[in-house]
């Protein structure tokens, strides 16, 4: 197990680093989102190959650009770390291969496909998570492809029924849509609505209801902590997508166990 975990962690940090580049370019409205080299956001010098090593190069450089010495945001290494942790947790959740030092002991293609599907959604989630924290916006470049993929997975995949998924998406659309309308996009925006629908489709209606509960529970706790430590005021705008996404990861990894526990204990 340890070999694929190390490899996937490294891959994940590289994808996380790539998400930073995507987020930066969405913000600057730059063309060529998917191609082109990484640059320092301040002096625009192209980074050298050894400066592109995820996480490590940030700390080796003391969190500064080696050309212009400007401080580089901590979100870069954090997003890289999140990328690594996402792939590793998804692999533990869906181990598609078992390696020993003598060779491959087990490999399942459907399991690999499911892992890849979850990874794509997972990376859209963490891309949005950081973008919303930094800029209070949710880019459609993540939500729309993810919704399309979940829809395809509902048709061709084996883990999700299209019917459950559609009901989940519709419930989410109504639940978040009403809030967007009532608040005139003040406390929830169109981006939150799209992300909410994605989550509804992704989980199907049963797990979506559980996800909602977890999302608001986390939201409440974290908002209270932020207020108590005076990090935010009652009136400041708090990004909602990070709660949606944290709740979704918890639901993905623990949702079925929580539901089973609930059913066995109380029903
Ligand atoms: Zn620089």
Image (tube, rainbow, N blue to C red):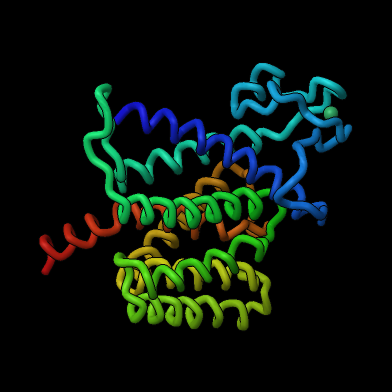
Q: Give the residue at x 33% y 65%.
A: 210
Quadrant where the image shows the N terminus: top left
Q: Give the residue at x 71% y 18%.
A: 61
Percent position (x, y) of residue 190?
A: 64, 73
Most distant residue in the front direction: 103
Can you tell me which quadrant of the image ligand 1 is in? top right
Residue 30 drawn above or below residue 199: above
Q: Quadrant of residue 229?
A: top right
Q: Quadrant of residue 217?
A: bottom left
Percent position (x, y) of residue 137?
A: 68, 60
Residue 218 drawn above or below residue 36: below
Out of 11 and 134, give the one closest to the viewer. Answer: 11
Out of 203 and 180, give the one closest to the viewer. Answer: 203
Q: Give the residue at x 49% y 60%.
A: 244
**Is 78 placed left or right of 200 in the picture?**
right
Percent position (x, y) of residue 233?
A: 65, 53
Q: Quadrant of residue 5?
A: top left
**Is 227 placed left or right of 6 in the picture?**
right
Residue 23 drawn above or below residue 264: above
Picture mark count: 0
Q: Give the residue at x 26% y 36%.
A: 98
Residue 98 drawn above or below residue 202: above
């Amino acid at each position: 197990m340890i070999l694929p975990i190390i490899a996937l962690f490294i891959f994940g940090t590289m994808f996380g680093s790539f998400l930073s580049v995507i987020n930066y370019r969405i913000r600057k409205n730059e063309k060529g989102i998917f191609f082109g080299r990484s640059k320092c956001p301040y002096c625009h010098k192209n980074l050298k190959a050894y400066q592109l090593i995820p996480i490590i190069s940030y700390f080796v450089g003391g969190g500064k650009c080696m050309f212009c010495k400007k401080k580089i945001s901590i979100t870069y290494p954090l997003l890289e770390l999140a990328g690594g942790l996402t792939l590793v947790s998804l692999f533990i959740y869906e181990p598609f291969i078992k390696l020993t030092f003598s060779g491959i002991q087990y490999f399942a293609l459907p399991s690999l496909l499911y892992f890849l599907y979850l990874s794509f959604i997972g990376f859209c989630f963490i891309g949005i998570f950081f973008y919303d924290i930094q800029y209070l916006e949710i880019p459609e470049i993540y939500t729309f492809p993810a919704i399309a993929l979940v829809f395809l997975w509902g048709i061709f995949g084996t883990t999700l029924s299209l019917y459950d998924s559609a009901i989940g998406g519709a419930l989410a659309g109504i639940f978040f849509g009403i809030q967007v309308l009532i608040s005139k996009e003040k406390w929830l925006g169109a981006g939150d609505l799209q992300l909410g629908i994605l989550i509804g489709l992704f989980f199907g209606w049963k797990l979506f209801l559980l996800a909602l509960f977890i999302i608001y529970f986390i939201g409440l706790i974290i908002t209270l902590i932020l207020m108590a430590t005076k990090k935010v005021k009652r009136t400041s705008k708090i990004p909602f997508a990070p709660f949606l996404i944290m709740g979704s990861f918890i639901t993905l990894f623990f949702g079925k166990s929580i539901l089973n526990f609930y059913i066995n204990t109380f029903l």
